[in-house]
Structure formats: structure tokens, C-alpha cells
Amino acid sequence: MGLLMNNMQSNFSAALVAKIDDVLEPLGYSLLLSNYRDDPQLIPKKLNYFASRAIDGLIIVGAEQQWPQLDMLKHLPFPIVSLITPLDNSQIDSIVVDNRASTTKVLAKMLELGHERIGVIVAPQTDYVARERFLGILDAFEAQQQLLAEELIYYGDYSKESGARGMAHLLTQKVTAVFVCNYNMSLGALQTIHTQQIHIGSALSFASYDYFDASDIFYPQLTVIKQPIPLIGQLAVERLLEKIRNQDHLKSETFTLTNTILWRDSIVKNNLKSE
């Protein structure tokens, strides 16, 4: 089986690869792994590589529908499953998660607890997942007929350093709650909070995405959204094998999995009066 990753350096990617390999090995399949490094220009070369190895099926991660390089997928002789992003192709299944809905739930809770100045650190709005998470934030404010002020939005670049910078900026804006849309950026944000000796759960409410239970080492434990990485990997393999058994004659489907929200004491009622 082929697995084409967008980025093999993230914690999410490492966990996903491990799960897919764990599922495939007992079934007698080996995993052929390659990476297009978030550069769609590399995709044709990578797809030709997989085709030359006569793989039985391909899982592709993080590909964006608008990339012209993906037209090549229509002509490949093996079934394909797309993870994290949906692809509009009659032969390709897509497995996504409810990032928008789960993000809305966390922001709605912050608003419900009286936070009027909620800062958010978001990823660049160039990919599907980042847009879905940001839309979830906006949905929560719209439902309460409120607006998210532009100065309370910090656009990071997925790095821990940008999370630290974003947190420093938001603290100058007198925020009482912060939501971070990415795991790495949340680590940087937490570093800034620690450096400035701000107490989460009293002086500041905080929530973010998490993958490796990092939230458990903080006190109070952090409210986090966790993607079902094992289930994503399991379903991807199961669906790919089903398509192979049916000689890829199955109608394409999009499967939406549910994130888990771990509600912890890092989100509390806002007792500070708005200035």
C-alpha cells in the first residue's frame, strides 16, 4: 500500500503512519511511504513513483481539491482514499473530521462563560483544515450575534515560535480567554503564558487542539480537541481494502468522524468586567 503524506514531521503524521502500518502488517501488506513536503508540484513525481511500484492502493493525506496536479489521480490504476481533506472525485473516498463543529462547541462554551475578549491563534488560511477551524470560531460568535475583533485574531504559521508570538500579542489585548487552532502553536502559546507567570484557569481560560496528551501534564489540565487518529487510520485501511475487493467499483463516499473534546478546568467563568 502507498501512503503519500503532506508533512512527515508533525506529531499527527507520525501517529497516523504508525496506526496505518499497525493495521496493514497483520493483513500481509507492507507500507510504501513518501512525502510531498506541502508542495503540490511534487505530487506528479510521487504518484509516478507509486505507480512504478505496482501498489494495490493509495492513501493520500492533506491534498487540496483545487490543486491541478490532482487531475492525475483520475488516471491511476489503483483505488485511492483521501484523508483530512475532501476530494471531489467519483473514484476517491474522503475521510475528514468535524473540526468546524467541535471548534464551535469550545468557543461557544467560552462565550457562555462570559468571555467578551477571546483571542484566537489560527493557522494560515491556505488549507482546508485551517479554514474549517477558523469557520468554527466565526460560527460560535455568529450564533451569539457577536463579532470577533480583528485585533484578537493572530495568524501563525504552524510553528511553536509563531504560537509564542501570537500569545504575547493577545496578552497585550487584555484577553480573558484564548483558543489555539494547532498543536505546535499551542505549545508556543503555553510557553509564553508560563514565562509571564499567568495562571490558566483563573487569570486566563485556555483551550487548543492536542494529539499526544500533552494537556495532561499541565495544572489545571487543559481543555483540548483531539482528533481520532487511530480511527482515521483504521477506517482508511478498511475502506481501501473494500475498494480493492470490489475492483474499485464502489461509489465514492465522504466519511466525517467526530473529534473528542476533553473538557477540563482550564476554561472557567469570566469574573472580570469588560473595560
Image (cartoon, grey):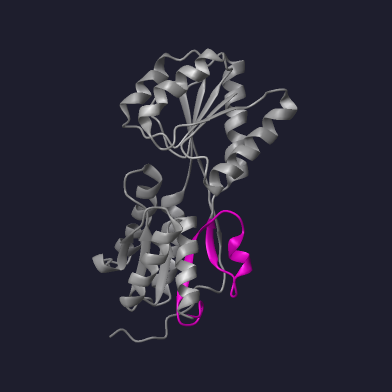
- Residue at image position (46%, 15%) is 76
Image x and y of residue 16, in percent:
59, 41
Quadrant that contains the N terminus: top right
Of the pair 138 and 171, the residue shown nearer to us: 171
- Residue at image position (46%, 82%) is 203
Image x and y of residue 102, in percent:
46, 55
Residue 130 versus residue 58 in the image, above or below: below
Query: Residue 126 appears in which quarter of the rendering?
Result: top left
- Residue at image position (34%, 58%) is 139
Instruction: Report the side of 249 relative to 154 (left or right).
Output: right
Quadrant that contains the C terminus: bottom left
Of the pair 21 and 148, the residue shown nearer to us: 21
Of the pair 222 and 15, the residue shown nearer to us: 15
Residue 244 visible, this orientation? yes
Residue 90 visible, this orientation? no
Instruction: Give yes or no for residue 211 being in the magenta stretch.
Output: yes
Region rendered in magenta: 198-225
